Image (spheres, rainbow, N blue to C red):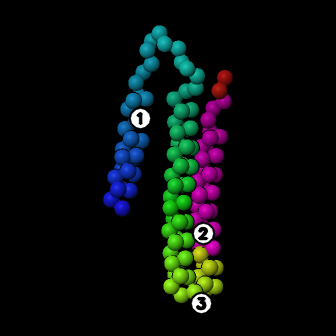
Amino acid sequence: MKKAFTVLGGFFAMILTSGLAFAQEAAHGAASSGGSDSTVWYAIAAAATMSIASAFGALSQSKAAATALEAIGRNPSAAGKIQTPMIIALALIESLVIYGLVIAYLIQTRIPTLG
C-alpha cells in the first residue's frame, strides 16, 4: 500500500508541476506548432480522466471479484447469495468508469477546431 501511495504521489506531483514547463512564452521568432495551449490542456485533461477512471475502476473490480470468490471458496453453498450482489457491485463500478468516459468526451468536444 505504501508503494501505491508513493507512485500515485509522484504521478500527481508530476501533473501539478508540469504546468510550470508549459507556462513559458514562446520565442519571438518561433512559429507556433499548431493548436493553442488550451487545446493541449483539454487533451491532457481528457486523457487523465480516462486513465484515472479506468485504473481505479479496474482495481476496485478486481478487489470486489477477489473478495467474492474468496467468500465462495470458504462457503460454497452461499455462492448464489454472493454472486448477485457481486454482479450488481461490478455493474455500479463500471458505471463510474462510463461516467469518466462521458466526462472525457465532454472535455474533448470543448477543443476548438484546428485550422
The residue nearer to you, when weighing 24 against 90, is: 90
* Residue bearing the label numbered 2: 90
Which quarter of the image is occupied by the N terminus?
bottom left
Going from N to C along the chain, the mark reached first, 3 or 2, is 3
Real-space Cα separation, disc 3 to disc 2, in angstroms: 21 Å
Q: Quadrant of residue 85?
A: bottom right
Residue 78 sits inside the magenta stretch: no
Q: Is 101 part of what is drawn in magenta? A: yes
Task: Identify the residue at horizontal 34%, vertical 52% (top origin).
Answer: 6
111 lies above or below 31: below
For the residue carrying disc 1, how many other residues have a C-alpha within 10 Å: few (<14), some (14-19), or many (20+)? few
Residue at horizontal 55%, vertical 27%?
Answer: 36
Q: Which residue is mark 1?
A: 19
Residue range of the region highlighted in magenta in the rendering: 87-113
Q: Quadrant of residue 54?
A: bottom right
Report the residue at 56% width, 38% height from top: 43
Judged left or right of residue 72, residue 20 is left
Tell me the distance, in whole angstroms, between the alpha carbons under discs 1 and 2: 36 Å
- Give the quarter of the image for residue 27: top left
Report the predominant secondary structure element of the magenta stretch. helix
- Count all numbered tags in the image, as a single digit: 3
Sequence-earlier tag: 1 or 3:
1
- Which residue carries the number 3 mark? 77
Image coordinates for residue 38, horizontal then vertical, percent:
53, 32
Q: Amino acid at mark 2?
A: Leu
Viewer-side label of 1, 2: 2
The image shows residue 85, relative to residue 30, as above or below, that is below
